[in-house]
């Protein structure tokens, strides 16, 4: 299936909703979708689980795995940037070294905060890789943050989906997806200003 073949994608989605696609295919598609639109992928996973195309457990695992791989990719991006002599010389001395120590001592809080506040993940996770913070603790906290985030959003969808379905008379897949999308958009709007403030503060510490 070509990446830009929209008719093929529409056909796959229609097949998934009718149970014709294999669960592993749906899971792989959801995992890949998280690399582009994370919250939409979670909403789609909940919708497919409510439809019965895949189990809730497999839906959570698929999107969670995709999100975790993306987070590790950001760490790897920072690690690769560290090999650039100009950046390494500029960002490993002075205030930047203090930022590295700050991240290392508050790694858990930084990762969990970046997961909740949109816009912080790119800066925080690439910085962790750039400053070569220990990979094992980073992976452990990322796994915890992704699990809480994924299960939390899908749990909200499952909890509110039933009442919405009855109140609005809409299909179950749509009903479970709506709370997830609304909550994700709400957090994005609320977290936009704190993310900008924290990013600016981090930039001052580096320069």
Image (cartoon, helix red, strand yellow):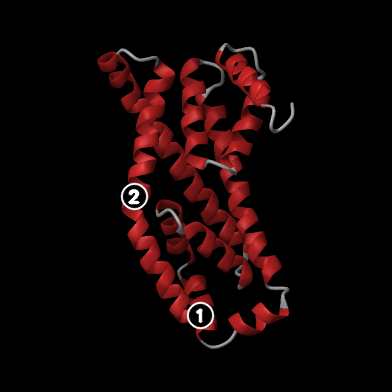
Badge 1 density bin: few <14, some 14–19, many ≥20, Cα 10 Å: some
Badge 2 density bin: few <14, some 14–19, many ≥20, Cα 10 Å: few
- Residue 122 left/right relative to 152: right
Residue at x-position 39% and y-position 68%? 198
Foreground pick, 194 / 63: 194
Residue at x-position 47% and y-position 23%? 47
Whole-percent x and y of residue 204? Answer: 44, 79
- Residue 7 left/right relative to 100: right
Q: Which residue is mark 2?
A: 189
Residue at x-position 54% and y-position 49%? 143
The N terminus sits in image quarter: top right
Labels 1 and 2: the sequence-earlier one: 2
**Looking at the rendered structure, which numbered label has been put on residue 206?**
1
In the image, residue 72 sits, relative to residue 185, either above or below, namely: below
In the image, residue 26 sits, relative to residue 37, either above or below, namely: above
- Residue 77 left/right relative to 111: right
């Amino acid at each position: 299936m070509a990446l830009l073949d929209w008719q093929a994608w529409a056909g796959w989605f229609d097949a998934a909703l009718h149970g014709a696609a294999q669960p592993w295919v749906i899971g792989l598609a959801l995992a890949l979708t998280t690399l582009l639109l994370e919250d939409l992928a979670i909403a789609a996973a909940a919708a497919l689980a409510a439809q019965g195309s895949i189990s809730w457990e497999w839906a959570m695992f698929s999107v969670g795995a995709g999100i975790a791989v993306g987070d590790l990719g950001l760490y790897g991006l920072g690690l690769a940037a560290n090999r650039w002599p100009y950046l390494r010389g500029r960002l490993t001395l002075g205030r930047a070294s203090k930022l590295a120590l700050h991240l290392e001592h508050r790694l858990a809080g930084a990762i969990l905060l970046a997961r909740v506040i949109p816009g912080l993940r790119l800066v925080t996770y690439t910085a962790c890789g750039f400053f070569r913070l220990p990979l094992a603790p980073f992976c452990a906290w990322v796994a915890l943050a992704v699990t809480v985030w994924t299960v939390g959003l899908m749990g909200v969808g499952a909890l509110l989906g039933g009442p919405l379905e009855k109140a609005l008379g809409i299909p179950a897949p749509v009903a479970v997806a709506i709370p997830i999308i609304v909550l994700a958009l709400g957090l994005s709007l609320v977290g936009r200003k704190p993310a900008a403030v924290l990013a600016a503060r981090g930039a001052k510490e580096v320069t």
